[in-house]
Every structure is written in C-alpha cells, then in structure tokens.
Image (cartoon, rainbow, N blue to C red):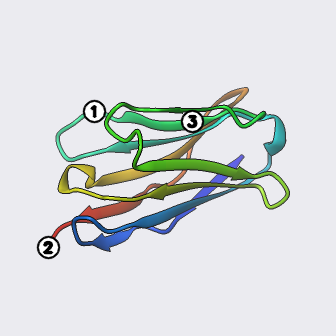
Amino acid sequence: VQLQASGGGLVQPGGSLRLSCKASGMNFSISKMAWYRQAPGKQRELVANITSSGTTNYADSVKGRFTISRDNARRLVHLQMNSLSPEDTAVYYCNTHYGRTYWGQGTQVTVSS
C-alpha cells in the first residue's frame, strides 16, 4: 500500500488549498480514508475521514471549512480547505487502515501572511 499526498503549500489567512492523496496497492473503493495533521509540538490529530459509502466525519475545529471527498475511479481522496487560519498550519497526512495502518509521506500546509 502506498499513499502519495500532494497539494500543500503556503497560503494567506482566509485562503484555500486542496490536498490530494493517491492510493495504490489496495482495494481503494472499500477502504475508509482519512486526513490527519500534526502541528509543531502537538500530537497528530484526525482532521476528517470518509467511509467507502461516502459518509464523512470532521474534527470540530474544521467543520464548515474543510470538505473531504473521494474519487474511487481515480483512487483519490481530497481535502478541500477553505477559510484557512494560522492554526491550520501543520503537516497533513493521508491515512488508511488496510490490514494495518498506513500513512502517506505528509504535505506541509503553512498559513501565514
């Protein structure tokens, strides 16, 4: 199983970014997918997840601002992030559990003016 995340970068407060994660080596369409993040000096935390049927779940801190979605045909999971604030600065990781837990390599998101 490989998870390849992309789409991070530097954005001003109030801006938007879209993260993508490409999965391979697994039956993507039946797998629950998630995004986590880890800010400097903090524990890794769940941002959002999406089940195989499309049911979504969000951390309270991102509800109404972030949207997770999946494209089963292309084996992609996306995280659309709007109204970003400096508190969203972190390394964002794609995650799945397929026999065991797998993590992508992480993509840095920095929100700063």
Asked if disc 3 and disc 2 are in contact, CB closer than 8 Å, the reply is: no
Q: Position of residue 97 (x, y in %)?
A: 65, 30
Q: Secondary structure at mark 3?
A: strand
89 on left or right of 64: left
Residue at the location (85% across, 57% down)?
73
The Cα–Cα distance between marks 3 and 1, rounded to whole angstroms, is 18 Å
At label 2, the amino acid type is Ser
**Residue 106 sits in which quadrant?**
bottom left
The numbered mark at residue 113 is: 2
**Residue 17 sits in which quadrant?**
bottom left
The numbered mark at residue 26 is: none
Q: Nearer the viewer, mark 1 or mark 2?
A: 2
Q: Which sits earlier in the primary sequence, circle 1 or circle 2? A: 1
Q: Secondary structure at mark 2?
A: loop
Residue at the location (27% across, 51% down)?
88
Q: Position of residue 5 (x, y in %)?
A: 55, 60
Vertical side of 12 occupied by 58: above or below: above
Q: Nearer the viewer, residue 36 or 13?
A: 13
Q: In which quadrant is the C terminus drawn? A: bottom left
Residue picked out by circle 1 = 43
Q: Position of residue 82 (x, y in %)?
A: 39, 59
The crowd level at tag 1 (other Cα within 10 Å; few <14, some 14-19, many 20+) is few
Q: Nearer the viewer, residue 2 or 16?
A: 16
At label 1, the amino acid type is Gln
Residue at the location (40% across, 49% down)?
65
Q: Nearer the viewer, residue 64 or 57?
A: 64
Asked if disc 1 and disc 2 are in contact, CB closer than 8 Å, the reply is: no
Residue picked out by circle 3 = 49
